[in-house]
Image (cartoon, grey):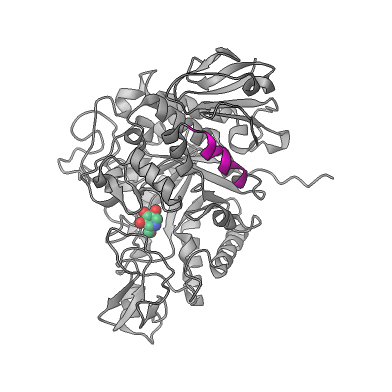
Amino acid sequence: MTHAHIPRRWYENAVFYQILVGVFNDTEGRGIGKLKGIAEKLDYLQWLGIDCLWLSPFYASPLRDDGYDIADYRAVHPDYGTMEDFEDLIAAVHARGMKLITDLALNHTSMDHHWFQESRKDPHGRYGDYYVWGDDPHRYPEIRIIFTDVETSNWSFDEVRGQYYFHRFYKEQPDLNYDNPDVHEEVLSLIDFWMDKGLDGFRLDAIPYLYERDGLGGESLPETLEFIEKLRAHMDKHYPDAFMVAEANQPPAETREYFGDGDRVHMVFNFPLMPRLYQAIATSQASPIVEIMPELLHLPAGAQWGNFLRNHDELTLEMVTEIERDLLYSAFLPDDSMRAHLGIARRLAPLMDNDRAKIELMFALMFGLPGAPFLYYGEELGMHDDSSLQDRDAVRTPMQWEPGPGAGFTTSDTPKRPIVGGEGISVAEQRHDPHSLLRFTRSLIAARKAHPELGIGNYEAIEVAEPALLAITRTLKVEDRVIASDPLSSAPLVCLYNFAPHPLAIPPQALANLSGIGRVEIGSVEAGTEIRSGDVIPAFGFFWLTAQ
Ligand code: NOJ
C-alpha cells in the first residue's frame, strides 16, 4: 500500500541558535544587548551555518524572571530597542534566507501586566476572571513547585483583592485563567500581532501548565492539549509555514502527547533524551541512550524533536529518577553553589571539565541523533559560566566576541552581567584557528547539512558487545528530503560514539552495514580516513562514517 507523501517542512532539519537579547551584542555602550546588535551579527551566524534564530523574551517586563514575566505582550522592552528595530531584524534575517522565532510565555504574565492590575482591583470587572483566584491556598496539592529555591507555595495572597492567586513560577508571575474564553481570544490576538510581523514561529514556554483541576493537578490536562489543538488550527489556517516548539518538561510518554496526531505542536524539546546524554558520559555506558530511543521514534508527519544540551535554564533533573539524579549530581555538581532548583546551572564546557573530546562527543550526539539541534549562544566557543551569580544567571553572561574587558560585547564598564572571559574563549580568537571548538562546530554543522538523514532519516541501533560504544545506522529515503537540494543519500551512514575514557577497538558488527570499511565524514580523526574493524576509536571519540 502506498501512502500519500506529506512533504517535509523546513524546521524539521533546521539548525537553531538561541539568543538572549540582553547579553548578545550591545551597540550603544550601555552594557545591555540590543536587537540592533543581533542584526550586526548575522554574518557570523550565517557563517556558522545557523538556519533559525530563537530570541528569548524581549517584551516589556520588570525582568523578575529575565523577561519570562511579561508586562505587555505587544511592546519591546526599551532596554533592547524599539519595535522598528525588531521589524528591521526580521527583514535582515529573511534577506539572508534565515528564519526567526520568538519566545511566548502564555501560562502567566507579570504582576505588572494591566490585566492583573485590573483583576486584583475589580473582581467583577472585565479582567476580574483573567487569573486563577481562590480563597484556599491548599487547593491543587498535587501540583509541584518548580522554583523550589525561592517559592514554598504555588499560591500567594493579594492584599488588594483579599484573595489568593495561583502561580506555577515566581509569585510575580500569576497564572492566566484558561477557563475564561476571553483569555483564549487575547492569546490568539497577540499571536496574530507577532505573526503578522512576519515571524517564522514561536517557542511555547511552560505550555503543560495552562489548566488546573481538583484531584488531577495541573500538568498536561486534556483541556490544555485541546487548547494547543486550537492554537495549531489557528496557526495552520493563518500562518501555514510557521511552526511552534513546545517546552514540555514531562516524562517521555507524556512529552509525546504534545505532538498529538500531528495536530498539536510541530516540535517538542527533547527533554526525555537530554539528561541521558549526560548520564552516558558520566557512566561510560551507551545504554541510557539506547534504551530511550525506541520511545522517541515514529513521530506523526511534520513532527520533530528539538534536541538540546543546554539552554538559559538549569540543566533540569526534574524528570529523572532519584538514583539518576544523585548520579548526575555527583558527576556534574562539585559545589552546591552551582545548583539551581532541581538542576545544575552550568554551561556545557565546564560540565565536561573543559575536555575537548567530551564536548565534541556531546555536540556530535546533539547534531547526530534524530531531531533538529538547538545550540545555546556561546556553547560553540566553550564559554564558561559564573556560579557566583544568582539562580540561572550563572549561564546567562555576555557573549564573548573578543578577548579583553568588554569581550566585544560592550564598551561599557558595567555590563548587564559580568563577563566571564577565559583565554582563547572568543569568536575573534577562534574564528581563524582551524583547531578551535568554533571551527569544529562549524564543520559539524556542515557535515550535518550534507547528511540530512541525521535529523530525519531512519534510525537503527547496531548491537555491539562493548557497553561503552553506541553504534547506529542512519538512512534516508528519497521522499524524506526536506529541500530539493538535499543529496539523495540512500547509502547508510554509520555513527559510532565512544563513552569510555580510553580508546576502543571497533567490533566488526559495527561496520557490517559498510561492508567492513568506512570513510570518516567527520569525527575524532581526519575526514577521509579509512576505518576497518579493529581500528580504534579514541577516548570519548566519535565517527560519522560513509561506505568507502
Ligand atoms: C521556562 C523558561 O525556560 C524559564 O526560564 C522561565 O523561568 C519559566 N519557564 C517561566 O516562564
Q: Quadrant of the N terminus?
A: top right
Could you tell whether 521 is left or right of 386 in the image? Answer: right
Q: Is residue 347 visible?
A: no
Could you tell whether 443 is left or right of 460 in the image? Answer: left
Magenta range is 285-295
Q: Position of residue 237 (x, y in %)?
A: 62, 60
| Residue shown at 48% from the left, 16% from the top | 525
Q: Position of residue 71 (x, y in %)?
A: 33, 65
| Residue shown at 46% from the left, 58% from the top | 194
Question: Is residue 196 part of the magenta span, yes or no?
Answer: no
Q: Is residue 497 visible?
A: yes
Could you tell whether 456 is left or right of 278 in the image? Answer: right
Chief SS of the magenta region: helix
Question: Is residue 289 part of the magenta span, yes or no?
Answer: yes
In the rendered image, the residue lying farthest to the left is 413
Task: Choose between 421 and 250: the one closer to the eye.
Answer: 250
Compared to residue 146, the image places residue 356 above or below, namely: above
Task: Choose between 328 and 90: the one closer to the eye.
Answer: 328
Compared to residue 264, the image places residue 280 above or below, namely: above
Q: Position of residue 530 (x, y in %)?
A: 58, 12
Compared to residue 292, the image places residue 139 above or below, namely: below
